[in-house]
Amino acid sequence: MKKIYTALFTTIIMLSTQLNAQLNYIFSTANKPYVPVTGGITPHLTTDYTGWAPEDEGFAKVPIGFRFNYNGTNYDSANVDVNGFITFTDSLNIGFNYQYFQNNLSTLPNFGQRPIIAALWDDLLLLDTSYLVYKTTGFAPSRVFTVEWKKVKWSYDAPNPVLSIELKLYETTNIIEFHYKDEGGIPYQQFAFASIGITAADVNRDFVSLQSTSADPQISLLKSIDSLAQKPADNQVYRFIPAAVPVPEKFRRSYSYTNNKLFLQLHSGELNGYEYAVTHSPIPPSSGTKTTSGNIAVFSLNAATTYYTYARSLLPGNLYSQWVCDSFTTADKPVPVPYHISGSNLINYLPADMREQDFTDTSLSYFPGQSGWEEITDFPHVGDTCLDGGNTFYDADDWAFTPGIKLSAGKTYQLKFGYLSYYEYNPGDPSKVEIKYGTAAGFAGMNSGTLFKKTIRTYAHYDENGGLPFRDTTIEFTPATTDVYYFGVHNLSINNYYSEGGFPIIGNFSISEKNSSPIAPLFALKGSTDNVNNILSWNNNNINNIQIQRSNDGINFINLATIKNQNNNIVKPRNFTRTDVHDVNYWNQLKGKSKVEYEKMLPLLSVSAQSESSKSSHLAKNTSPDYVDKNVQGTNYYRMQYIDANGSTVYSNIIVLRDNAVAGQLSAYPNPAKNLITVKVTLTGNEKMRLNITDNSGKTMLTKTISIGTRETIIQVDVSHFYAGTYFIKLISDDGDERAIEKFIKQ
């Protein structure tokens, strides 16, 4: 080991500028005599709450005595806390809304109070403030800074001192060392919940956590242990050595997987030697499979299984980086569409078919009443089922995942949900949320794209019920391949109610297949404008409860009105031209009657009037506009929506109205398309137009200038290089008017 460490220290100096921002330390253990600090300095301990005694909850900022590099950043002072840890930035204390017992390495505290170096982080008690000392010894460039907690009680109720603890920082090598001396007492078990480890400065979930206090404990980069209750052995040493080899990039940017296979793309500077492992444990392996290639594939994974993926960089001479790691869960018993979140009627429980994941642990979990996401039923209205993203104060970066849902390539699906931002203290505090989907459960599996991302400013409060509607949203998407897909709802809100106190509520979440039947036989929507109002008409008045919808961008539609009683049970005769007063009176009574009433009154008309009325009833068509959208300006898109008896949603064609003219006609085929798509454009008048193709997020994929005449113009567009998904073709005039829009799907 001595030779390895010597080589390692030499390489550290040479490669110090290449250290990655990710926490990158190698853990080791030793046993050597404990040497108490003599002639140490007692810092002036303070608290920010008069109810706490300094020997119980004190802290102080002290000089290190040299420049210490921790994880790529230089520090010359440290904040020492009575409770067995130091920080290199702000102290942790009640003034930061951070109590002594919140000793979780993975999540807390907020950025700006990290990094934390925890030799034994728990509720410790000194016999006197003089029992906390610090001292810098030796000569440059090999000085050592030591903090000693002498004869501490492990919780204030412990009858006797349990341990003496030293934390050492080494100049040049930048090694961190924890050293322990047994003082004979035992921890007070009821309140012994310690953490030992180190954290990064500005990234939650970036830590090294000891899983026990044994002579050779396992560590985890995924699972933070904050319940250690056994003291380390006398003369035990735990050591964290900066790795000389740059750690690979985070997996979130470099790997993907489906239900039975995993792909890694590893990158770590100029290095091309790696070691990787795929396991069932959150504890890093002692070794893995070595490779000189950054492209790795693992096949034949089991269904319904959580896997932990590890990788690290290698150099000759047995030098290596810290592991990078993540986890995912393969598909299990996929459910068909339609899927919706069903209520469990147990407040604070996540719906039983969903799982949660947050930055404290990459494994998926279901803990009723303890997860970051919870369920609310009948809010804001009776019958609503909601996911509430604010069960605790620290829920930022929490995910809730659906079960696997079987979807087919080329088919269009609809994601429907409503959203609100809920606040507890500060009215108007927004929340942030995104919805993604992918081929495996877990945030690393969200590899198919973002469907929704928004800062929500539609507010609710805990005492509001029954009056505030959801902001209903429908998103259409088309999977690239037939597979089992998972949908994740991600709480991006800042994790402190006192800074950005809103948290998201997602309601009535459902996924269904869009009706793929041709829409032309059912609806043919037409329109015109009188420069003030947009006038809509359609070819089918026999359907009840039609939704008239309008959009400003051709993508996001809102409901304007519901058209009812447009069916053949209501008689709408044509204008009656006879002058016979008797017939006219009865004729007027016939208007608007049901067929049964009409047939009863028909014999009271003269023979000729009956004949005329019969013609009218069979050819009945309301000659007035079917719908008028009043006082509209600019470009507006219109469509009709109808939900049939099977629950499928059917849409009409989309028309575009602007000012005093109906936009041109636009069609595209084949749809879906693979390589080439043919666009047909018809517009009266000679002018130049731009043909724009955008993706579902509005990004322009192609712009083409064309000349349009009175005859049809045919354009072929190569879309072979487009990603699979939904796209929009827009016809735009020189002055920026959108004259027509058509959607197509790229397979």
Image (tube, grey):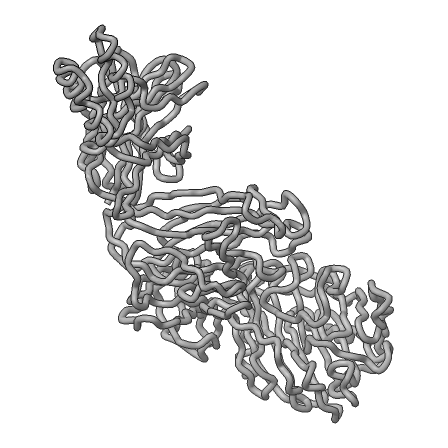
Up/down of 505 relative to 548, above or below: below
Report whether 528 appears left or right of 69: left
Q: Position of residue 710 (x, y in %)?
A: 21, 13
Up/down of 584 relative to 71, above or below: above
Q: Is 126 in front, or is 3?
A: 126
Up/down of 531 relative to 390, above or below: above
- Looking at the image, which residue is at 39% across and 29% down? 550
Up/down of 733 relative to 239, above or below: above
Quadrant in the picture for residue 167: bottom right
- Looking at the image, which residue is at 84% across and 82% down? 127
Query: Which residue lies most toward the bottom here?
Result: 184
Q: Is 507 in front, or is 271?
A: 507
Q: Which quarter of the figure is the C terminus placed in?
A: top left
Q: Which quarter of the figure is the N terminus placed in?
A: bottom right
- Looking at the image, which residue is at 31% across and 50% down? 512
Query: Does residue 568 appear anywhere in the picture?
Result: no
- Looking at the image, which residue is at 18% across and 33% down? 521
Report whether 445 appears left or right of 609: right
Report whether 558 appears left or right of 97: left
Q: Position of residue 173 (x, y in %)?
A: 63, 71
Q: Position of residue 625 (x, y in %)?
A: 32, 19
Q: Is 9 in front, or is 63?
A: 63
